[in-house]
Amino acid sequence: MAEKSLRKRKEQILRFMKEPEYVPMRRREIAAVLQVPQAARQELEQVLETLLQEGSVVMDTRGRYHVEKAELKTGIYRGTSREFGFLSPEDGGEDIYIEAGSTLGALNGDVVQAAVFESDSGGRLYTGRIIKILERANETVVGTFFKEKGYGFVIAEDKRLGRDIFIEKADTMGAVSGHKVEVRLTDFGDGRQNPVGKVTEILGHINDPGSDLLTVLRAFRIPTEFPAEVMEAAGRVPEKISEKECAGRLDLRDEVMITIDGEDAKDLDDAVSLRRTDEGYLLGVHIADVTEYVKENAPLDAEARKRGTSVYLIDRVVPMLPHRLSNGICSLNAGEDRLALSCLMELKEDGTIYGHRLAESVIHVNRRTSYTEVAKVLAAGEEQREELEQEYGEVYPMLLLMEKVSGLLRQKRKERGAIDFDFPESKIIVDEKGMPVEIKPYERNTATRMIEDFMLAANETVAEDFFWQEVPFVYRVHESPDEDKIRRLGVLIQNFGYNLRGSKSAPHPKVLQNLLEKSDGSPEEALIARLTLRSMKQAKYMVDCEGHFGLATKYYCHFTSPIRRYPDLQIHRIIKENLRGTLNGDRRAHYRGILPEVATHSSKTERTAEEAERELEKMKKCEYAQEHIGLTAEGIISGITNYGMYVELPNTIEGMIRLSSLTDDYYFFDEENYCLTGESTHQVYRLGQKLTVRINSVDKMLKTIDFLPVSR
């Protein structure tokens, strides 16, 4: 349609809608009232679509057009596997529902502009219609290729894209069904037509060992190689520190200190020390001084800032910094002098922190230990004391003292209401080809809790210090949970006889802590912990100190891992400038300018890393289950939906029993009581119920495992 003609038609439609007699109508009703002939209906559709995209009119959830101008909001589109999605506004606030016909072809992660209006459907308060796509997030997509006669299509790894990608026969690169491929999008689609793309690389077959890791790395755009200039800069970093570098630093080389890490850890960025004082205890948390070698805006810093975090993928790490730093000069190896940033905390006999000192230091770790080793030492009986004293020397009494002090710190957190999620995560052991050979719970022990207690204390101490100094900073913030999610949690836990007393609105964290304590030691303990965790918001980085709900503290930051987290490295730089007296007005203004973007980007890269780690874990669990089809085990019902129930096995593998496989009766989802109920047998399946199941089938592409119930 010519531009002049389009403008004229738009004016006509707007005049019609602005008449006092006009009531919101659907497109066909407008066509009937205006007596638009059938041949011109497509032209009317084009005019209405243009008005929608301009925001001059809006369409409600019933497909009716309103002339009132909608509020325009910009944000990130969050897709789903079912073609509808949500707009996360850039100015904050609640997500806005975008129904399937209103996406304009936006894909998950795109920056979009949407017309937002009040919903009259009685459900969500606000709905929206995307009117403009400002920035595409998916120039390339990774997925599984399927060949059809004359063409192909790719199902994306990211199911939130919502649509398959059409591939012309000439653009398949010879891929066959089951190949994992990378695709460059040539047409993003418009919400009605699917995206179109070209295969640019075949990553391997879905059944090939190692293809899953490469698929995850590409799908989440995780860089595996460092640019040449970054490696050159890393190559210039010294392997040992000099006495000149130690000048002016607090010399703690005579202080007894140790590192406690996993057996296979290589980047040891924290050491701890502890000794008695007249008033109580002096606890030292000593963190590798990474900023001494990673200068602001230098290639190493720019790359670390871009990556945001190290990514841990089963048996390997994609590091934030080159190994020459993370495993070398910045690793607090025993027997080596190292530069550190130390937080020395003064504790009373009851564990109260009453004073502290931050200092640039030089340290010398006496002994490297592991979590398993320390846990065994602490569990040893009195009859082994002499042997341990000979083996560990002055480290042994310090370990005993550490166990005591960590207990005091934990008790202090408990008293204020901090939530301790102590449920087992998955530990996946793979062979040299990357195939899973064992999956089991990874449980915390005395030593892991001890280090956690000390790191939490240092993070809180540093955050509170810099909050009251009113210095530009990056805080770790965990907001209070949504009331709707807490109400839903209250309904779910009633299945186990629990309740959330005094939590009509957002509860105090102590309410959730009490719930976890009541379920401690019960069969449903791990499930209650997961349900509680899912009810809470995700922590993020912010420049405003808005508190940490889960830890029940007003002040919290990440100070203890500058090797693997950029926010820690950034605040080390601020702390050192503050200690040196160079954090003047210009530098404060500089940090106020850059820190909001640092916080936002770091939160984003953290989420990406977590999603990648979860995705690979699901793949490995499917691979393991595939090799154990027919295995029978007792599990616990971990989730219930209107199409089946999830069962989690003791080794942390979770699968679904579909309603169609429950052949003894017709089962329906009782939403009020949150259970499955048999229509004639009245058999009830509830959350937390034990159930014997058999692994029946695995879909590696969808990453799903199906169970069948086993009668006993």
Image (cartoon, rainbow, N blue to C red):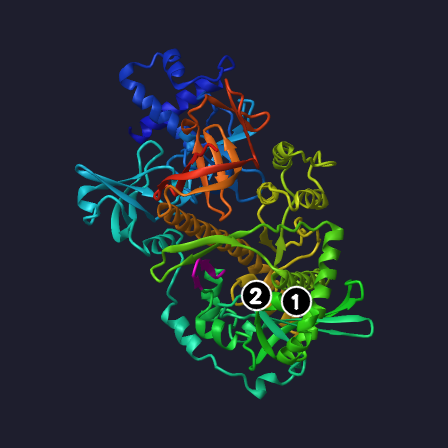
- Residue ranking furthest to the bottom: 243
Mark 2 element type:
helix
Dot 1 amino acid type: Leu
Q: Residue 307: where, in percent of width, then height?
A: 46, 61
Image height check: is 640 above or below 413? above
Mark 1 element type:
helix
Of 105 and 458, which appears nearest the observer?
458
Q: CA distance from mark 2 to mark 1?
A: 10 Å
Magenta residue span: 309-318
Q: Residue at x 57, y 29 (%)?
A: 674
Q: Which residue is mark 1?
A: 378
Q: Is residue 381 left or right of residue 104?
A: right
Dot 2 amino acid type: Thr
Q: Quadrant of the N terminus?
A: top left
Q: Which picture quadrant has residue 408?
A: bottom right
Q: Which residue is mark 2?
A: 372
**What crowding class fits label 1: few (fewer than 14 Cα within 10 Å), some (14-19), or many (20 or more)?**
some
